[in-house]
Image: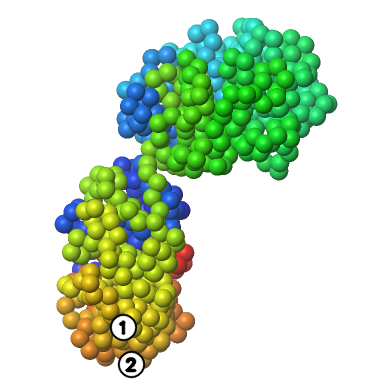
Amino acid sequence: MVMRNLLLPIGFSMFGVAASAQITTPRPQWWITDGTVNAIELDPITNTVALGGAFSYVGPNNPFGTEVDLGTSQVRPQMPRINGVVQTAVSDGAGGWYIGGAFTEVGGLPRLRLAHILSDGSVGPWAPTANNTVFTMLMHAGALYIGGGFGLVNGVPRPRIATLDPATGSLGSWGSTQTVSPPTVIFAMALAGGKIYLGGSISSLTISAIPYTRNNLMALDAATGAIDPWAPTASHAVTKLIASASEVYVAGDFTSLNGTARNYCGALDATTGTLLPWDPSPNLSTTKTVSSLVLHTDRIFLAGSFTQLAGLPANRLAAVDLTTGAIHPTTVPTPDASVSALALDPSGTTLFAAGSFLSMAGQDRRCMAAIDIATGSVTSLDIRHSPGTLTLTCSGTGLFNGGSFLSSGGRSRTNIAVLDGTTGVAVPTQPNVAFNAGVRAIACAQGMWYVGGDFSSPTPHLLAIDQTSGALDTWNPAANGSVRALAVDGSSIYAAGDFTNIGGQPRNGLAELSLLSNINIATAWDPAPDGTVRALQLDASHVYAGGAFNNIGGAGHRGVASLDRTTALAEAIAYDLDISGSCHALDLFNSDLYIAGDFTTINGIAANRIGMVDATTGTLSANLGSSLVDGPVRAITCKAAFSSCAGTSPW
């Protein structure tokens, strides 16, 4: 779950009567997380926003395709936003990229699975169309060759393969005489000796009215499209190809080539299709273990999820001999998880790798790393992003990263991050705290972020972080259970959750604490709820508590109550939920108290999971849930004429 999925804004008139509902598009410049966000706190003094939850990364909202500027070692911010998976990319030779995939829009412009991104990051006018996914591309003799699952290109029949003019996007004649039998899909292309070698899920096809049978591999004349007699067989789909004048190296889902055992990779004679001795023999797995391969002088680099080659340890990234397939003596760093894509720079000095790993050779490298081929060492390039890279392509000055990922160029963060309130980008100084479990609540006061949650380290369930330095403060009330809600006012902070002891005092899930760093003892204020408190709001005289209790402050109140800030006694005002209902969130706006959770009534009157009551009387002003809400609401925030609620994050 990422942060951009959390908010459902609901509009109201200034008089509080439900007027409309709308889903708004998240601001694309705001950074997102790779997990659940449970708490959002704005500090108007520093204009920063703290996020808390269960996540390990925060980064730009730049999904599916990005470029790393190899001069600055940074992700280029000018790249257009892409709305679907990018499967393949080819340099245009002028600092831009041709891309193919499953997208339908690039930079706000309609682009049906094919697009041209110019060197300045703008979307070029080049706009051919394919009616299904484009998986592979290559440039040859002034034409862009494409392969995939499509049947139409520019509205004209071109089953699975076609050529396009890279300047105009006009369709070439190559592939026009072919018909195929579904489910033929082309996943990979390679060029050598005037032939285009194709790998995929290939069976029967017809070219110039003549039927042919091919088993996941075939070759066509690069100029005419005529079928070549080259016809080796693979037991399952071929997804990667490298071709030279004498050999074709293949990888995919197969376990045999030409009827002989070859686990996920092998080599074939480029002319006859005869199986060659090259056999790295990765260990068998329930998942495809070789996802990428690249050729470098006397070796081939393999990447995937394998842990052995020919019975010898080789963890997910390896170099093998070009002739035998045996492990090459060159040093290759070890990632801690699978590698999904590889690319070489044109000079052949640097190998780029992407995948789901978090470290490479013990160095912190989140999902991307660069390797010096001469030494085998990990370079200083440190581009962190979310997993999902499917293709890497290097032009020399830029590295294109395409796939199903949602963010690239962010920062590793464990359960807390602070963003600039205007730009939405992570501020330079982040909390320097290592949480061992999730964050549930954040509040700010007196230059501190107060943080509560499920964590037991570095302090149990509640701590304070200096906003300027990011350092952990000495304040430590030491709750013995999760802290789910915090509210700050003046010199006091109120904490609610699952604890029975906090600040050295017995407190059943609700307590008042001092904000002073040298005072860690709970005050005498003790409403003693008989169930969990999940939400808190304050005004000058009252603490509003919401949760799953039936008695609080010495009186019977079900789910929501108003408590005196001095005596801790419950006010007579009732906001009772139905007998099986519970409150997950509260917000106070002027004299209106917004209640959200999992309930059907407030004070016996219909209110579907969201209600607005008069805080001073308990009178239900509006049943805001109506038919709009079909599940529990976990959070609600009311500002001016609008309210935002969240219901996607499990409590």
What secondary structure is marked by label 2? Answer: strand
Q: In the picture provided, is 171 more to the left or to the right than 589?
A: right
> What number is the disc on residue 260?
none
Specify few, some or many for label 2: CA neighbours under 10 Å numbering under 14, 14-19, or 20 or more. some
Using the image as rendered, state which of residue 44 and residue 168 is in the foreground: 44
Using the image as rendered, state which of residue 457 and residue 633 is in the foreground: 457
Residue at 42 percent of width and 14 percent of height: 93
Give the alpha-carbon distance from disc 1 to disc 2, as whole Å.
9 Å
**Image quarter (top left, top right, bottom left or bottom right) of the C terminus:** bottom left
Specify few, some or many for label 1: CA neighbours under 10 Å numbering under 14, 14-19, or 20 or more. many
Query: Which residue bears the numbered disc 1?
Result: 561
Residue at 59 percent of width and 32 percent of height: 317
Query: Which residue bears the numbered disc 2?
Result: 555
Image position, residue 170 (x, y; %): 49, 14
Residue 238 in view (yes/no): no
Residue 452 in view (yes/no): yes
Residue at 56 percent of width and 42 percent of height: 337
Image position, residue 596 (x, y; %): 36, 71
Residue at 61 percent of width and 29 percent of height: 318
